Image (tube, rainbow, N blue to C red):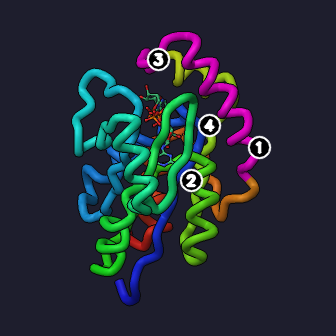
Amino acid sequence: MSERPRLTVLSGPSGVGKSTVVAHMRKEHPEVWLSVSATTRRPRPGEKHGVHYFFVSDEEMDKLIANGELLEWAEFAGNRYGTPRAAVLDRLEAGEPVLLEIDLQGARQVRESMADAQLVFLAPPSWEELVRRLTGRGTEPPEVIERRLDAARIELAAEPEFDVTLVNTSVEDVARELLALMDVL
Ligand SMILES: Nc1nc2c(ncn2[C@@H]2O[C@H](COP(=O)(O)OP(=O)(O)O)[C@@H](O)[C@H]2O)c(=O)[nH]1
Ligand SMILES: Nc1ncnc2c1ncn2[C@@H]1O[C@H](COP(=O)(O)OP(=O)(O)O)[C@@H](O)[C@H]1O
């Protein structure tokens, strides 16, 4: 790796497979540094504080925002999510490949604040398959799934704003393509 790697942002509708792809990629390439976001969402079974997210209260999130500690933040389906700024800048400064897995609103903010970031959109093979994956994951009740599908319609329409689109048919293929985009392969 010659020069400072660019920041890469991975976005796409809830249930498309972002976490699955990133986990697969990092199993073989743990040198890819994944930002851990702060969120006001409650943990799902198995999710660990400091690993999957920093689970914070509304008051703590208010403070992070007020103190300018977030590179970007957004409200998504009733909860707030944000990227801690300092860790991202440190890792980029250290020359590491840095990945953010964030929503469309966050991706737009990163584009504004870091012009050389590369924005990658993960798309489902079809709408029906997205619904199947989100429902099949079994982590959200029906009304939350509905809210996320409403957001998904908006996110899918914004796909042309991204630099690259990858279609998540095969986790292995997408993981490889993402690594190549990040200059890790
Ligand atoms: N803007 C922003 N979005 C985030 C952040 N962290 C996660 N998200 C996004 O918030 C949405 C909901 O995330 P989550 O509740 O974990 O559900 P999941 O992505 O369906 O597993 C997804 O689109 C995430 O990519 C963040 O720090 N900032
Ligand atoms: N390429 C794929 N083919 C089939 N199922 C997939 C694929 N990628 C992910 N999944 C499944 O879809 C569901 C949602 O994936 P997840 O990674 O949680 O999505 P996201 O992080 O984008 O919300 C999970 O049950 C996951 O196992």
Whole-Å distance between the Cαs marked 2 and 1? 16 Å
- Which residue was labeled with disc 1? 157
Q: Do the residues labelled 1 and 4 touch (CB within 8 Å)?
A: no
Q: Quick check: is the Cβ at mark 2 less than 8 Å away from ligand 1?
A: yes
Crowding near pointer 2: few (<14 within 10 Å), some, many (20+)? many
Nearer the observer, 145 or 15: 145
Dot placed on the residue nearer the N-terminal end, 3 or 2 = 2
Q: Is mark 3 within 8 Å of ligand 1?
A: yes
Position of residue 98 measured from the top left corner of the image (x, y, whole percent) = 38, 66
CA gap between label 3 and label 1 equals: 23 Å
* Front residue of this view, candidates 160 and 185: 160
Q: Which of marks 4 and 2 is nearer the N terminus?
A: 2
Which is in the foreground here, disc 4 or disc 3? 3
Q: Which residue is drawn at 56% across and 64% down?
A: 110
Residue 176 horizontal/vertical position (percent): 43, 57
Task: Please name the residue shown 67% across and 59% down the image.
Answer: 162
Q: Where is residue 145 in the image (x, y as percent from the top left)?
A: 57, 19
Q: Residues within 10 Å of mark 4 (few under 14, many from 20)?
A: many
Q: How far apart are marks 4 and 3 (CA)?
A: 19 Å
Q: Residue at x 24, y 44 (%)?
A: 51
Q: Which residue has dot 3 on it?
A: 140
Residue under numbered circle 2: 106
Q: Is mark 2 on a helix, strand or loop?
A: helix
Q: Where is residue 134 drawn, in percent x and y?
A: 53, 23
Q: For residue 70, which numbered disc appears in the image?
A: none
Q: Does residue 142 show up magenta in the picture?
A: yes
Q: Is mark 1 within 8 Å of ligand 1?
A: no
For badge 2, the amino acid type reads Gly
Q: Nearer the viewer, mark 4 or mark 2?
A: 2
Q: Give whichever of discs 1 and 4 has the lower sequence position.
A: 4
Residue at the spot of label 4? 124
Range covered by the magenta-colored residues: 137-159
